Image (cartoon, helix red, strand yellow):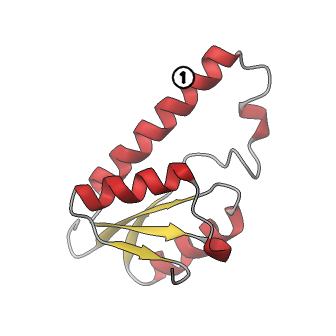
Amino acid sequence: MVGKYKVITLCGSTRFKDAFMQAQKRLTLQGNIVISVGLFGHSGDSEVWEGMSEDTLTNTKLMLDDMHKRKIDMADEIFVINVGGYIGSSTRSEIAYAQATGKPVRYLEEI
């Protein structure tokens, strides 16, 4: 908590940009501080990856994955954007990390 506000980190595939934005707005209006992804690599922000060498691309993806775990560290809980029940391997690792660190996990759609 920061003051009276719960901190929630959004997790999920970046292909669901619209669902991320809707959840961020809804959770914010419910009185939460919401931490989201820095960019949407699967549904926009393609200019970030254009012209990147394979080595740089690999290192950037590793950095972003690690950075998202730090966002989970800062949160009281995570909220998984699992449109159509989809949870990819990266999101699964974030869920496992959150659970291992005692963070509650909530889902957009029931699993």
Q: Is residue 51 left or right of residue 91?
A: right
Q: Place residue 22 in its image quadrant.
A: bottom right
Count of numbered labels shown in the rendering: 1
The residue lying toward the viewer, choosing from 34 and 82, is: 82
> Which residue corresponds to the image point at 50% horizontal and 31% vertical from the top-left?
62
Q: Place residue 104 in its image quadrant.
A: bottom left
The vertical placement of 92 against 39, above or below, is below
The residue lying toward the viewer, choosing from 5 and 92, is: 92
Instruction: Where is residue 2? Give x, y as percent.
Output: 23, 65
The kind of residue tagged 1 is Asn
> Which residue corresponds to the image point at 72% horizontal and 48% vertical from the top-left?
42
The vertical placement of 99 against 3, above or below, is above
The vertical placement of 20 against 52, above or below, is below
Q: Place residue 16 in its image quadrant.
A: bottom right
The residue lying toward the viewer, choosing from 40 and 82, is: 82
Graded by Cα atoms within 10 Å as few (under 14), some (14 to 19) or many (20 or more), the crowding at tag 1 reads few
Report the quarter where the N terminus lies. bottom left
> Which residue corresponds to the image point at 53% horizontal and 70% vertical from the top-left?
24
In the rendered image, which residue does mark 1 sit on?
A: 59
Q: Secondary structure at mark 1?
A: helix
Instruction: Where is residue 110? Give x, y as percent.
Output: 51, 84
The vertical placement of 52 against 31, above or below, is above
Instruction: Where is residue 111? Give x, y as percent.
Output: 51, 80
> Which residue corresponds to the image point at 47% horizontal and 82% vertical from the top-left?
29
